[in-house]
Amino acid sequence: MKTKLYILSLLLAACLAPASSEARQTEASINFDFYGEPVNLPFEQSLFVDFTASLSEKTVQGFYQTMVTRDYSSLIKALQQYKEQYRLDDWLYYQLIRKTAQHISPKAANYHRYTLYKWFLLTGSGYDAILSIKADRILFYVQTDENIYNIPGRLRNGKQYICLNYHDYGIINFEKEIFTEVIIPVPGAVKGFSYKVTHLPDFNKTDYQEKEISFNYNELDYHFKLRLNPQIKTIFANYPVVDYESYFNIPLSKETYSSLIPDLKKHVKGMNQKNGIDFLMRFTRYAFLFEPDSRQFGNEKRLSPEQTLLYEQSDCDDRAALFFCLVKEIYNLPMIVLAFPEHVTIAVRFDKPVGTPIIYNGEKYSVCEPTPQKQDLKLGQLIPGLNKKVYEVAYAYTPRN
């Protein structure tokens, strides 16, 4: 009886094996976690296109011609559905594309192929992106109308294109090294790319870490327990220097917001508006260590408000961004960003100005210095010596309501 049952089970397994194999091929997919959200993308291995040839206009164009013979429509449609479902700004959508390309063609295994996949998925999503090559290097650019700093770009038909993978090569002397654009017309690839980040992912709560910070105000010690997510560093690792309006308005993630803003509101609740702003100014000034970007990162890097909370050290424009965020969230007052040649600070518009006001568009703004200085500056006091320096109002914020 046992022998018959064993034979019957073998026959049954043999019958089911082809069906199971076929099902696996039909259900082939790419699966990964994207900042707390499970991603499942359709991808048959038969879609994969290899690229092992030497880099040239002809071989890159040949790669594209082969790619368009495969049906990538389901994959690109699924990517766009995730973009819409999770309200991904272009920068976050590009991170999703990077991770998808990494699963299809790992960066370490074949950098050229990995870059070509990123370009193909981005242009397939409707974005205007181009490639340029020299020897064994390939640069990947996307069209944007925004002001982007510290990243090389190129002009094409009067439009600005910013390099997305420059960080992988370090410094390139474009005066000595001439890159050639690979001409590949991609139907429908006409959208400009925006570096504005208006929404952060809903990270898993378990991914957050607790950080204690404190400062002294009017001889009283105040302590805060922040909930911070290290993945913020990953999201903005290669984020370029953007204009002040863009990076000042990058929001806090929900968990970080709920661990800080309600506590700050509680502490300033019994204060008048000016004392409350003074509290926020001194919190931003003294709860964090100061370090110039040149020492911490080796170059200019503007931190978003949450990055400033996350890093142990920060400089003047990082403090200005955090202070701006706190004032906006708690008081929502008009503010201007004052950019001096070597310093950035904030001025707030009160009902009645404090100290010597800054006049902008007929309105009086009071300087609120959020960066530690040699002397204890009060509301309305500008750093000595800056009153004779030329400055630019780099961003003016006016509450909508």
Image (cartoon, rainbow, N blue to C red):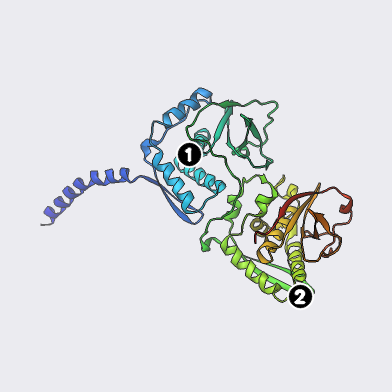
Task: Give the quarter of the figure containing the N terminus.
Answer: bottom left
Of 127 and 221, nearer the camera is 127
The residue drawn where x is 67% and y is 70% is 264
Three-letter residue code for mark 1: Leu
Q: Kindly check if marks 2 and 1 are in contact, taking CB atoms under 8 A apart as contact.
A: no
Classify mark 2: helix, strand or loop.
Answer: strand
Q: Is residue 115 left or right of residue 316?
A: left
The single residue placed furthest to the left in the displayed view is 1
Q: Where is residue 95 in the image (x, y as percent from the top left)?
A: 53, 46
Three-letter residue code for mark 2: Leu
Q: Where is residue 87 in the image (x, y as percent from the top left)?
A: 51, 53
* Rendered image: mark on residue 220: 2
Q: Which of marks 2 and 1 is nearer the N terminus?
A: 1
**Mark 2 or mark 1, which is nearer to you?**
1
The residue drawn where x is 69% and y is 73% is 267
The residue drawn where x is 77% and y is 67% is 278
* Rendered image: mark on residue 121: 1
* Rendered image: mark on residue 298: none
Q: Where is residue 359 in the image (x, y as percent from the top left)?
A: 82, 55
